[in-house]
Every structure is written in structure tokens, then in C-alpha cells.
């Protein structure tokens, strides 16, 4: 799958020009692990993670990467191939995580790391949600807990590839009941109906 997308996608000269103009600062794996742990703790407590003024809508690097990812997902019948791959997988959650991770990796390579480090989690979530929508359109039954588990796998994989010992983060993530995501989603779906007209 990744080879198909790599072959069909090439960064435009606009992306190359923009990337040369913007110096990027990378965080250490330990800083990224700390941010992810804080986000998970905030999520467990029912709070929104601190965004620290991060706005993907106004960041040109994020927007360029998002556009590239959307093209990778939907051009040249890639969505059809993605849907088939996830639908025929033994473990749809793992296939969902792997597909989204590969799209993110390819996007990062082709855009020369356009997404700022503080927006990587938001970008990963964006791509994962798009891949989940493709799967659902192909009648792959997914629950919010499945998407949450896929995101967990992606985070642990990324940090592991960065040389981080993910044991403690894995333990912290395992304390979150995946069914909680289903309950939260069900509550969000009911909320508009409860609003007075």
C-alpha cells in the first residue's frame, strides 16, 4: 500500500519552496513522550489536553501536509485500495493504525517534516479519522474505541521507533477503558437531541 501511494504522490514545487523557507524545530523523544502522557492524563480526567496556542487551521505546514495526505488518500482510487485492505484484514484496528501511520510517514517525508512537532498528535488524529471514514464507507464496523485503540498503537509505534521505552506510557494507556470512548461518543450523539428548540 505504501509503495502505491509513494509512487503516485510527489510533492509540488510549492511545498518544496515553503519547506525551504520555514526552519523546523524538533523535540526530543522524551519531550514528545511527556506531552503524550500529559494528553492521556487530561483525557482520563475528562479535560481537553492543553493546546498551548496550537491552531492547525492557521499553520501553513500543517495545512500543506493535510492537503498532501488528503490527496494520498483520495487520488488515483487509493481510498478504494485502503478500504479493501482494511476490510480484508484479520484485525481491522491494526490495519487502520498501520494504514494511517504509513500515510503520516509518507506525508512527513514528502513535505520534509512540515507538521510542527506540537501538532503531530492532531495531525495523526486527522489522518486516522479520514482512514476510519474510508473504512466505514466500505461497511467496516468501527466503534470509537477501535479508533482510540488504533491511535494508541500509532503513538506507541512512533515513540518506539524514536528509541523511547514505551513501557510506562503503555501502562498508563492501558488504564483507560476503551469502552469509555464508546460511551463518550454515544453521549455526544444524544446531546443535540436534548437541546431545547
Image (spheres, rainbow, N blue to C red):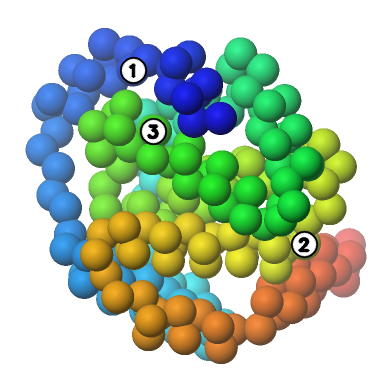
Mark 2 residue element: loop
**Separation (CA) of disc 2 from disc 3:** 26 Å
Q: Alpha carbon of mark 1 to alpha carbon of mark 2: how far?
A: 34 Å
Query: Where 24 falls versus 90 (above or below)?
Result: above
* Residue 168 x %, y %: 37, 85
Q: Which mark is residue 143?
A: 2
Q: Which mark is residue 107?
A: 3
Along the horizontal axis of the image, is 32 left or right of 25?
right
- Crowding near pointer 1: few (<14 within 10 Å), some, many (20+)? some
- Tag of residue 36: none
Q: Is residue 44 visible?
A: yes
- Sequence-wise, the earlier of marks 2 and 3 is 3
Quarter of the image holding residue 36?
Answer: bottom left
Q: Residues within 10 Å of mark 2 (few under 14, many from 20)?
A: some
- Nearest the eye: 42 or 30: 30
Instruction: Residue at 56% x, 88% y: name it.
Output: 175
Tell me the crowding category of disc 3: few under 14, some 14 to 19, or many 20 or more residues within 10 angstroms, Cα based.
many
Counting every numbered tag in the picture gives 3
Residue 166 place in picture, x, y as percent: 36, 75
Q: Is residue 41 left or right of residue 164?
A: right
Q: Residue at 47% x, 25% y: name it.
A: 3
In-front residue for pair 197/17: 17
- Residue beneath disc 1: 11
Q: In x, y percent, where is residue 172?
A: 46, 85
**Residue 177 placement (x, y as % from top left):** 66, 83
Q: Quadrant of the N terminus?
A: top right
SS category of the residue bearing label 1: loop
1 or 3: tag closer to the N-terminus: 1
Residue, x 14% and y 33% (percent of image)?
A: 22
Amino acid at each position: 500500500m505504501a509503495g502505491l501511494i509513494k509512487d503516485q504522490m510527489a510533492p509540488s514545487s510549492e511545498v518544496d519552496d515553503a519547506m525551504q523557507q520555514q526552519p523546523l524545530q524538533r523535540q526530543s523523544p522524551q519531550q514528545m513522550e511527556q506531552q503524550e502522557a500529559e494528553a492521556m492524563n487530561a483525557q482520563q480526567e475528562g479535560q481537553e489536553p492543553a493546546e498551548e496556542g496550537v491552531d492547525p487551521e492557521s499553520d501553513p505546514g500543517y495545512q500543506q501536509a493535510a492537503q498532501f495526505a488528503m490527496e494520498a488518500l483520495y487520488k488515483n482510487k487509493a481510498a478504494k485500495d485502503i478500504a479493501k485492505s482494511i476490510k480484508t484484514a484479520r484485525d481491522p484496528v491494526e490495519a487502520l493504525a498501520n494504514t494511517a501511520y504509513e500515510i503520516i510517514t509518507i506525508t512527513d517525508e514528502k513535505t520534509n517534516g512540515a507538521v510542527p512537532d506540537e501538532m503531530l498528535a492532531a495531525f495523526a488524529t486527522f489522518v486516522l479519522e479520514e482512514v476510519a471514514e474510508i473504512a466505514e464507507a466500505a461497511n467496516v464496523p468501527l466503534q470509537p474505541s477501535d479508533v482510540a485503540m488504533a491511535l494508541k498503537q500509532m503513538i506507541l509505534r512512533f515513540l518506539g521507533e524514536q528509541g523511547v521505552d514505551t513501557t510506562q506510557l503503555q501502562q498508563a494507556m492501558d488504564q483507560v477503558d476503551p469502552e469509555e470512548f464508546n460511551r463518550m461518543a454515544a453521549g455526544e450523539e444524544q446531546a443535540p437531541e436534548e437541546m431545547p428548540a
